[in-house]
Amino acid sequence: MPTAFVNKIAKVCDLPISTVESKWKDSISTIKGKFPSVDEESSRFFALVTGLLKKSLGSECLSKLESSDDLITAEEMLTKLFEVKFKKVVRQGKIVRKAQCGKGFKFSGGRCKKIGSAEKIARSKGAKRGAKKIRAKSKQIARRRAKSNKRRANLR
């Protein structure tokens, strides 16, 4: 089964998937033969295989790939992860800009930073503790809401 990367290259270069997939497999075997010390799971291995595949497809296809907006580089992907997006929210009657980061990131020091494992665990425990408290108070909250709604109905 071809990978998404192979499918995307075949689509951009207008080549059959089987051709691109066979060149991909040839590239893998060539890199394994020339660089036996490089681990198959490493990013360097993938970079070598990708580079060899692009060279084997030719300059015409390479120019199409470079002009294509669908494929993004690793640098662009990292900048998207660390990019801060601002959302307008209402706080105490005023419109305020709220910073939003990607999943697993937090806004600190004017930029998005990856949340550490200790903080993830602490946040998870806090969320569980909060869920227990809200579950215990849910009957009381529902009763107060119903009472408030009755009052509103009498005011109309």
Image (cartoon, grey):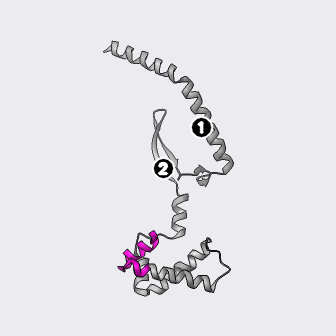
The residue segment tinted magenta is 1-20
Q: Is residue 150 left or right of residue 115?
A: left
Pair 1/2: label in front: 1
Instruction: Report how far apart the C-alphas of labels 1 and 2 lie in the structure.
Output: 24 Å
| 117 within the magenta span | no
Residue 14's spot in the image, x, y percent? 35, 79
Residue 85's spot in the image, x, y percent? 49, 53
Q: For the residue marked with disc 2, what is the amino acid?
A: Phe
Residue 3's spot in the image, x, y percent? 46, 70
Q: Nearer the viewer, residue 79 or 59?
A: 59
The disc placed on residue 24 is none
Which image quarter is the C terminus in?
top left
The residue that mark 1 highlights is 127
| Label 1: which secondary element | helix
Task: Kindly identify the residue that appears in the image at 46 percent across and 21 percent down.
Answer: 142
| Label 2: which secondary element | strand
Q: List the single residue furthest toward the left.
A: 156
Task: Kindly identify the residue that appears in the image at 40 percent across and 79 percent down.
Answer: 18
Q: Are marks 1 and 2 in contact (CB under 8 Å)?
A: no
Q: Is residue 101 above or below residue 66?
A: above
**Which badge, 1 or 2, is on the more N-terminal residue?**
2
Q: For the residue marked with disc 1, what is the amino acid?
A: Ala
Would you call the spot at circle 2 few (<14 residues within 10 Å), some (14-19), or many (20 or more)? few
Q: Is residue 154 above or below residue 7?
A: above
Which image quarter is the N terminus in?
bottom left
The quadrant holding residue 34 is: bottom right
The quadrant holding residue 132 is: top right
The residue that mark 2 highlights is 86
Residue 75's spot in the image, x, y percent? 54, 68
Task: Kindly identify the residue that appears in the image at 59 percent across and 28 percent down.
Answer: 133
